[in-house]
Image: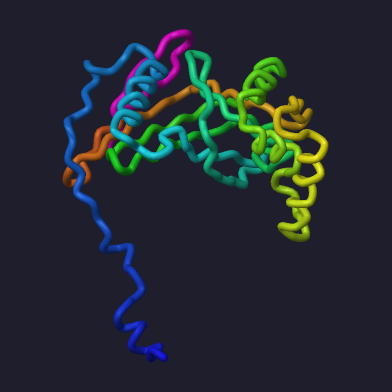
Amino acid sequence: MADVTDDAAQNPTPDPAVMRERYLSTPLVESELAATPMEQFADWFRQAVSRGLREPNAMVVSTATPDGRPSSRTVLLKRYDERGFVFFTNYRSRKGRELEANPRISLLFPWHSITRQIMVTGTAARTGRDETAAYFRTRPHGSQLGAWASDQSSVIGSRDEILGRYEELAARYPEGEQVPAPPEWGGIRVAPETVEFWQGHENRLHDRLRYVRAGAAWRVERLAP
């Protein structure tokens, strides 16, 4: 049996204070930005995909209660256009309930491997049921059943409890049979008010260019790193 003391000496607790990456990249300049943040997002998103970034549509979604208590989680972006960014969730989940009471929201795309981040702030609103139903039909059969089986964010007694619900649904809706979208499940569209494009540079002199909505137009401002 290995000595615990020797094992601790060989595998000391990692010190996050000494962990550093040296960022080297081409400067991000205002003259090269697209006219709108959604066009710029589309360009960076294409580049992230072409560079083989794993799950570039994964984003950290942050919400807050009306009295300012925040919460965050990783969610997958499923659609974007000039109207904003769309993801899908159970409306009775923590984020769903918080957004119903306080529609202010932020999104973060943490593309560490290519030294880029995109930060979005804006207002959330539910998509129409037609849009929800259309997307739900594209989900794998198992994911459709999972949306029904999970009352997201609620306390459950065990994993067996949710697996039991899933098996009941699988018997009711076998593979190949159409599964309706749950009434409490649907899309959230985030209409952006600011979108910041962050690109890492050496000596921590990063580029931060932020689009800010100004009526129907956008202005761009540079932020200190």
From the image, which quarter does the N terminus lie in? bottom left
Q: Residue at x 24, y 38 (%)?
A: 206
Q: Residue at x 32, y 68 (%)?
A: 15
Q: Nearer the viewer, residue 180 or 121?
A: 180
**Residue 168 is drawn in which quadrant?**
top right
Q: Is residue 171 left or right of residue 95?
A: right
Q: Main secondary structure of the magenta part?
A: strand
Q: Position of residue 58 (x, y in %)?
A: 47, 37
Q: Is residue 215 left or right of residue 29?
A: right
Q: Is residue 223 magenta?
A: yes
Q: Is residue 80 magenta?
A: no
Q: Position of residue 37 (x, y in %)?
A: 39, 19
Q: Position of residue 91 (x, y in %)?
A: 71, 34
Q: Nearer the viewer, residue 202 or 86?
A: 86
Instruction: Magenta stretch: give its range.
Output: 209-225
Q: Nearer the viewer, residue 215 or 30?
A: 30
* Residue 215 against residue 43 in the figure, above or below: above
